[in-house]
């Protein structure tokens, strides 16, 4: 059995609230977010101790940032398109309901050309 050390920390309510929001948006537990931040901090410290970020990693980061920007743009376009489609579906739904209403059938001409009253 592997022992996992446990650390207890006290946080201001505002920090805890922010962590809770972030964890909720990511679909993970608060402890997972805290672990992620600790790993990130340790990684950055190790990079600083080793003299900075190597060029290969810098290039890869720039590529990822470029891809992220592209994907964010695609998401925005998709959201806009989806919003427009949902509005058009609601408009069509309203028109169908209007056409299916009894009032429309009452105003249709009979065979003889006379309207039903």
Image (cartoon, rainbow, N blue to C red):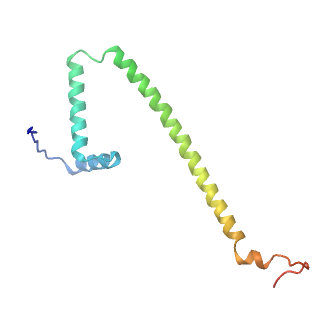
The front one of 13 and 60 is: 60
Q: Which residue is drawn at 80% across and 77% down?
A: 107
Q: In this view, does 17 lie above or below 70?
A: below
- Vertical position of residue 29 compared to residue 64: above or below: below
x, y (%) of residue 69? 47, 31
- The relative height of residue 42 versus residue 84 in the rendered view (above or below) is above
Please state, as top left, top right, bottom left or bottom right, where the N terminus lies in the image: top left
Kindly indicate the quadrant of the structure image that contains residue 96.
bottom right
* 113 sits left or right of 52 in the view: right
Q: x, y (%) of residue 87?
A: 61, 56
Q: In which quarter of the image is residue 110?
A: bottom right
In the shown orientation, is residue 32 left or right of residue 80? left
Residue 22, position in %: x, y?
31, 45
How many numbered marks does the figure carry? 0
In the picture as drawn, the residue positioned furthest to the bottom comes out as 117
Q: Is residue 59 left or right of residue 88?
A: left
- Farthest front residue in view: 1
**Residue at left 53%, top 37%?**
74
Rendered residue at 52%/41% (across/down): 76
Q: Residue at x 49, y 34 (%)?
A: 71
Q: Horizontally, is 2 left or right of 101 in the view?
A: left
Check the image and report above or below for 34 versus 105. Answer: above
- The residue closer to the viewer here, 104 or 34, is 104
Residue 48 image offset from top left, x and y in percent: 23, 20
Quarter of the image that includes the C terminus: bottom right
């Amino acid at each position: 059995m592997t022992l996992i050390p446990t650390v207890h920390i006290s946080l201001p309510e505002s920090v805890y609230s922010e962590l809770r929001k972030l964890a909720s948006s990511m679909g993970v537990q608060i402890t997972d977010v805290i672990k992620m931040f600790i790993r990130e901090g340790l990684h950055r410290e190790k990079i600083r101790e080793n003299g900075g970020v190597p060029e290969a990693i810098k290039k890869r980061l720039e590529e990822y940032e470029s891809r992220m920007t592209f994907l964010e743009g695609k998401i925005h376009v998709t959201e806009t398109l989806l919003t427009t489609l949902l509005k058009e579906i609601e408009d069509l739904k309203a028109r169908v309901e209007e056409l299916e209403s009894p009032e429309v059938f009452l105003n249709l001409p009979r065979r003889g050309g006379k309207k039903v009253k």
